[in-house]
Amino acid sequence: MYRGQPCHAIKKLISMKTCKTVIALAAVISFTACKKEFTQSSSINASTQNDVAENSRKSCPEIDPSDFVKEVTNPYFPLRPGTKYYYINRIVEGKEVTIEHDVVTVTSKTKMILGVPCTVVHDEVKVDGSVTEDTYDWYAQDKHGNVWYFGESTREREDTGWSTEGSWQAGVDGACEGIIMWAHPENHIAEVYYQEYLKGEAEDQAEVINTNTTVKVPLRTFHNCLDTKEFSRLEPSVVSHKFYAKGIGEIKEVQTRGGTEVDELISVTHH
């Protein structure tokens, strides 16, 4: 379900009992995981991404499995097992137009990561009937409603075969879990945060823009949507905006810099 940079890349928090520094970015961004939600001393915009470059996260949040719940019920990111989201992503590169068909399925499976039972979400992308991307994402929600992203197992078809670049798991090789959805996004407007972190492999960041956007997609028109801006040091020329509707989740992604892509929700079904 989580889709990184750019839109067609395979898709793709905050309460801990122990306060611990999570990210140190040369006095640009500072996260601390304290009782309720992260607070940040400052924020950056897309133009300062490269300044953040080599100042990686020096430590990960200290995870206490007892701080997590079994189900992901955050209204902006609900993961009800059996739910299927169908998206169509339109990619324009010069005169060439590619249409991706993306089916995201919330499975009933869980994966234990750092002692936390994570919900497994399967994301499959097809072009002209052939699978081009296949991923399994792992999410968990804490007691306060923040949703954490614990990693992904991903593969993407390339000219030379399948690539697993971008795969990562929290706690392995220095990878850290990140925020995929705040419990109260309205309290984090203009803050920048990591959604994932494995240096040189997965460094997507996001910023909450507002929670009152009206968004029209083929499914219908949604009001009071959450708008987030996403970017990565690994692709500094690419910026996209994602939109989330309460009770549904992600409904649209638009690449606003570095390419022309529009990914929209077509249907949602429950089984």
Image: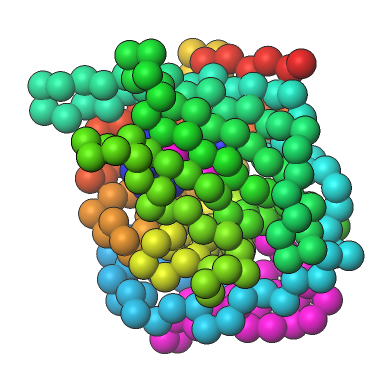
Q: Residue at x 29, y 38 (%)?
A: 161
Q: Is residue 160 left or right of residue 130?
A: left
Residue 136 covered by magenta stretch: no
Quadrant for the C terminus, please. Answer: top right
Q: Quadrant of residue 68?
A: bottom right
Against 16, is 262 above or below? above
Q: Is residue 204 left or right of residue 35?
A: left
Residue at the far front in the pictured view: 161
Q: Quadrant of residue 142?
A: bottom right
Which is nearer the eye, 118 or 220?
118
Q: How many marks?
A: 0
Against 55, is 159 above or below? above
**In x, y percent, where is residue 83?**
70, 24
Prevailing SS of the magenta stretch: loop
Residue at the far left in the pictured view: 95
**In x, y percent, where is residue 175?**
54, 68
Residue 36 covered by magenta stretch: yes
Against 257, is 97 above or below? above
Q: Which residues are magenta?
A: 10-39
**In x, y percent, where is residue 219?**
55, 14
Q: Residue at x 33, y 14 (%)?
A: 128
Q: Residue at x 63, y 27 (%)?
A: 105
